[in-house]
Image: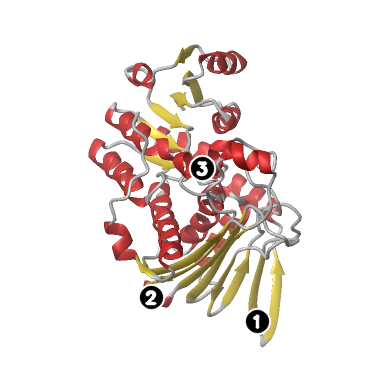
Amino acid sequence: MRKIRIGVIGVGQIGKSHLQNYASIPDAEIVAVCDVNEQEARRVAEQYNIPSVYTDYREMLSRDDIEAVDVCLHNNFHAPMTIAALEAGKHVYCEKPIAGTYFDGKRMVEAAKETGKMLHIQLATLYRKETKAAKALIDGGKLGNIYHARSTGFRRRNRPFVDGYGTKFFTKKETATGGALIDMGVYHIAQMLYLLDLPTPTRISGKVYQEMDMDPRRREESGFDVEELALGFVKFKNNLTLDIIESWSVHLGGFEGPSILGSKGGIRLPVFGEGTQNQFSFHSTIGDMDMDSTVNLDLTDYRWHNLRENEDAYDSSQHHWIAALQGRVELLPTADIALQTMLISDGIYLSDKRGEEVSAEELANLKTSTSVTI
């Protein structure tokens, strides 16, 4: 298959992670990187044998030989950079969340449609073995009528920067818009929306917290003004509901994993985070006996890779991106999933601010933007 020539914008923590992942994909050819920190950009380019380095993204986007751009910047830069790349005729792969607000994310989706270019959002949980197993059970009708799901994400005490990990830009609304909910929660909510076949939300309520102690010096330096714990409840059409709990920091030893409840069966997935011990399981009643089943996901994954065509296209978000650009598979609707995830996040924040449930219709009509001018 032909190689895909890619330019990467941003060589910070996320950019380096993306470059490391591309290194394992033979058909991905990184031909340029761009970052305002020229010294770091050149160091990273040398490490990965990337021929071209830019500090002005406009120069990189002007190249006709770059087919796709990977945006690895903080949340409030996603919309302006993605739209600029789409309008320059590039397909775009953007780090999660889609943007800082639903309004900004919608602008990105609309720009992709207007330009006829593909927009892909990094939602790593869609490609996990347990997600594939859950999808197979749901598509096979083993859950029956699905009526409720739970999205969970756990960190014991691992807030960016103030607890020693990551940079202070994750902790300020100015650059990140939110905290635990749209840093990690996006993965888990998106996973549920994907498995639930992207249901239509109607009403959203939620509450966010920042209550736990943190290092005073780091608190002051970071300007920490985002949540460390988020809770939400979403009502969808067709009598479906979703509850959400997402933690950067909480005094507990762990959460139960995400779950999906149906009239014929239920699924529990592993929770992502430290100090948690659980596995994928399927629960049903057979022969008037309540059955709790586990699955050998590694063996299933091995068999599917040997029997299914293009199964490698679902090994990771970036494998899928390259395969879709090559035309081997149809791109999963990650932009639509990420956009709806953003709507739910906006709803939780607005509900917390007002102290009441809010409607999805109102949220969809808000023109709130946190986009940074570039």
Instruction: Answer above or below: position of 260 versus 211.
Output: below
- Residue that protrudes farthest toward the bottom in the picture: 288
- Please tell me the numbered disc located at residue 92: none
- Please tell me the numbered disc located at residue 238: 2
Cα separation, mark 1 vs mark 3, equals 51 Å
Cα separation, mark 3 vs mark 2, equals 37 Å
Q: Is residue 130 visible?
A: yes
Q: Percent position (x, y) of residue 1?
A: 46, 27
Q: In what element is the residue under mark 3?
A: loop
Could you tell me which quadrant the C terminus lies in? top left
Give whichever of 74, 351 is nearer the camera. Answer: 351
Going by the image, does 79 lie left or right of 317?
left
Query: Which amino acid type corresponds to the residue marked 3 in the rendered image?
Result: Lys
Contact between marks 1 and 3 (CB within 8 A): the answer is no
Instruction: Answer above or below: position of 313 versus 40.
Output: below
Of mark 1 and mark 3, the one earlier in the sequence is 3
Provide the residue designation for mark 1.
Answer: 286
Give whichever of 339, 364 is nearer the camera. Answer: 364
Front disc: 3 or 2: 3
- Please tell me the numbered disc located at residue 172: 3
Q: Is residue 139 visible?
A: no
| Dot 2 crowding, Cα within 10 Å, few <14, some 14–19, many 20+ | few
Q: Percent position (x, y) of residue 174?
A: 45, 40
Query: Which amino acid type corresponds to the residue marked 1 in the rendered image?
Result: Ile
Query: Which amino acid type corresponds to the residue marked 2 in the rendered image?
Result: Asn
Locate residue 210: give its quadrant. bottom right
Cα separation, mark 1 vs mark 2, equals 27 Å
Give whichever of 123, 209 is nearer the camera. Answer: 209
Name the colouring of the figure: secondary structure
